[in-house]
Image: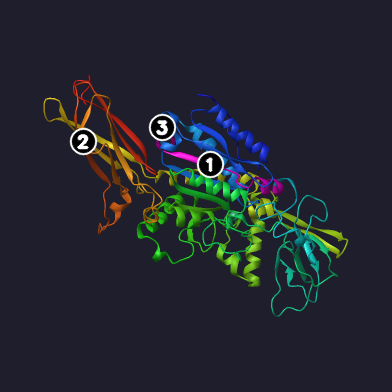
Amino acid sequence: MPERIPFACDRYLTYAELAAELHAIAAAYPHLATVHSAGTSYEGRDILAVTITNEQTGAPEEKPAIYCDGNIHAGEVAPSMILLHAADYLTQRFGRDKEVDHLLNTRTFYLLPRVNPDGAEKYLTTPHLLRSSVRPYPDESVSRMPGLHPVDIDGDGRILTMRVRDDRRGAWKKSHRDPRAMIPRGPDEWEGPFYHLYREGELRNTEGEPFEERPTQWGLDINRNFPSNWHPEIEGGGPYPTSEPEVRAIVEFLVNHPNIGALQAFHTHGGFYYRNPYQYPEEEMDAEDLQATRQIARTGEKVTGYTDEKSDNCCTLTEWAYEHHGILGYTTEVWDRLTRAGVDRMEYRESVDPEAREEMEIKLLRWNDRRVGGRAFHDWREFEHPQLGSVELGGWDPKLSVQNPPEELLHQECYKNTRWIMKHAAALPRLHIEDVQVTQEGADVYRIAARVGNAGYLPTSASNKARSLGVVEPDRVKLQIPDGVEMLYGDSEKEIDYLHGYISGHDPRDTATGESCVQAEWVVRAREGDVLTVRATSDRGGRHSEDVCIANCGDDR
Ligand SMILES: [Zn+2]
């Protein structure tokens, strides 16, 4: 077996470095991995996709598949590293890990680690912070609007926070317990010092305070550009659905791979899964699909510690994939520094109580000092701002602390999310020819009976939604006969409809209609030694075939 030292997942890779790693995996494991371009970004970079399966047990498109992408949001670079790690893990462990062998023998993984390569490159190689694409939106005039624009004003390579003293109107104060921590000024507090907290930047077209903090000229949010419930007022959603080349590439990839029955869109941060349904109550979702999405999330929770949350975002990949294609998927928000520091996420989001905020900030700073060598927080330091005068720059590192794990903690996120992808892929349907019987009915007349079943958790349509949308073809079973064999009874190809997964057996009332296995029969006129082939085909459940021999073929079939 070829050896390759897997990427250690201890730093964030630029586009060129990531592309080199993906090509190296394909070169080391040609029977397991191939790399191709799924499309071209706004600036002309290839959106790379790696396909992973054991080609010796079937071509990628003949197996049920999971699709995973990451980094659609420019700054969410940890997901790229997670998907590179997954590609490494699956190829490296094949042949020495029963679970990996089972998955690669029976399923296909389509991994697109960096679907927004332009945005990620800007994020990783400049001080800029941006939501997604580098295409200016709505146009470049945003950068001339009066107000405070984010700029690396001291040229240290980072856009941090500015602490500006104002004892009259300042809304923040320093903690007495740790002067690095900034806590809200209480309603009864009149004795300073008090401060404003602004993003590091420069004033444009404005005369001092008060001023507004301005967004960047990169106003697109391409995870609001998918063709599901899209409307023109969606913030950052673009001029029309799939207007952005990265989104169009993803949509076309899913449409052109009808074997995809599961999906993961990796994001940061928060440590939870957004799941379907998005914009309606879950009572309105198909009951079995809801059960599946929640039960699969439970298997993920065991390996990641993340819990599932119903989302209400619109026009996202995961919403579109389910509502238009019946593909159950998750928006997995990896990494949560709050949990690591022992801070409650909901309380941090909502509480403005000064004492509670102080306690949380102190816990976070303790985590920074003890667990990550002080690299997540930059100590305040004085700076003579050309427009605002004396200010201090510092605060939490927005890139490698808040939005992504510090490098020394990246590997943990990579490992547990690779496990999560594997758990999700294991739930895919799996069409299987369970048994073929040949019975002699006359001198040269034989009855062939094949039992075809679904050995997977999900139905062969991957969801009930997909059936109601009519986006998957019914499963088929076919008897292929060589020249000289005559079909006396039965259509050579039969529709067998969709087969239930074993999830249907969990319903104690057993209200499910349909079957998890079916029998197909043919009668043929054939001679001893003729070899016929039974082929079962499902869009999302995979393909399976078995040869059938008419008597005395040298085995006990
Ligand atoms: Zn995101």
Mark 1 sits on what residue?
Answer: 111
* Residue type at numbered disc 1: Leu
Q: Is residue 511 above or below residue 427?
A: below
Q: Residue flagged by tag 3: what amino acid is it?
A: Gly
Which label sits in the foreground, 2 or 1?
A: 2
Q: Say which residue label 2 marks.
A: 522
Helix, strand or loop for disc 1: strand
Which residue position holds label 3?
58
Instruction: Judge the density around disc 2: few (<14), some (14-19), many (≥20) Cα neighbours within 10 Å.
Output: some
Category of crowding for the residue at label 1, using alpha-carbon neighbours closer than 10 angstroms: few (below 14), some (14–19), many (at least 20): many
Res 109 visible: yes
| Disc nearest the viewer among 1 and 3 | 3
Q: Position of residue 509 (x, y in %)?
A: 25, 59
Q: Secondary structure at mark 3?
A: loop
Asked whether the residues under the numbered discs 2 and 3 touch, taking CB atoms below 8 Å apart as contact, a structural biologist would say no
Q: Which residues are magenta?
A: 100-123
- Residue 390 to residue 26: above or below: below
Quarter residue 476 falls in:
top left
Mark 3 burial class by Cα count in 10 Å: few <14, some 14-19, many 20+:
some
x, y percent for residue 415 = 53, 43
Q: Is residue 121 magenta?
A: yes
For residue 358, what is the image quadrant? Answer: bottom right
Among the two numbered marks 2 and 1 on one chain, the one whose residue lies closer to the N terminus: 1
- Give the Cα distance between marks 1 and 3: 18 Å
